[in-house]
Amino acid sequence: MQTRHTSVEEEWMDNGNDGYDEYSLEQDAEEEEDGDDNDDEEQLLLLKAAENPVDEDEDSCEYSCPRYYRPVCVLRNNQLVTYATPCEYYNQLRCTSVRQRQSQTVPTFQFQYNGACHQ
């Protein structure tokens, strides 16, 4: 008897649609051998989401993030910072971009690696 392994990824998305949030359930039967799903594809989607619409402001730049722990290590103003998910990191980028367009002083960010920062 063979067992087929599948993973279920749940994500809560706030699409800015006046309080009607969308809950999507995504099943990924083609999980990579190391148990990690396709991070490159997810990062590409998050990068696209980080591009700011012109009408976005400081109140709308932060999107709802899923409640899973997939830490990323980022250099923020030359200090290592661990964000719980890539989504939280991209929220910071998005809001920083909004503040920059408003001529405010903003921190610098540089993605280091997937996983918690090692000090």
Image (tube, rainbow, N blue to C red):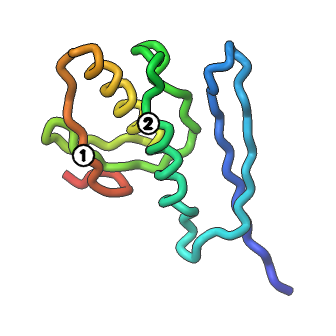
Front-most of residues 5 and 47:
47
Left or right placement of residue 101 versus residue 49 in this view: left
Q: Residue at x 55, y 62 (%)?
A: 38
Q: Residue at x 73, y 50 (%)?
A: 26
Q: Residue at x 48, y 42 (%)?
A: 48
Front-most of residues 53 and 108:
53
Measured as percent of width and height from the top left, residue 70 is found at 47, 50
Measured as percent of width and height from the top left, residue 49 is found at 50, 37
Count of all numbered marks drawn on residues in the image: 2
Measured as percent of width and height from the top left, residue 75 is found at 22, 44
Q: Residue at x 55, y 44 (%)?
A: 68
Give the foreground label among 1 and 2.
Answer: 2
Indicate the amino acid at tag 1. Answer: Gln
Measured as percent of width and height from the top left, residue 101 is found at 29, 20
As helix, strand or loop, the secondary structure at mark 1 comes to strand
Quarter of the image with the N terminus in it: bottom right
Question: Label 1, on which residue?
Answer: 110
As helix, strand or loop, the secondary structure at mark 2 comes to helix
Indicate the amino acid at tag 2. Answer: Ala
For the residue carrying disc 1, how many other residues have a C-alpha within 10 Å: few (<14), some (14-19), or many (20+)?
Answer: few
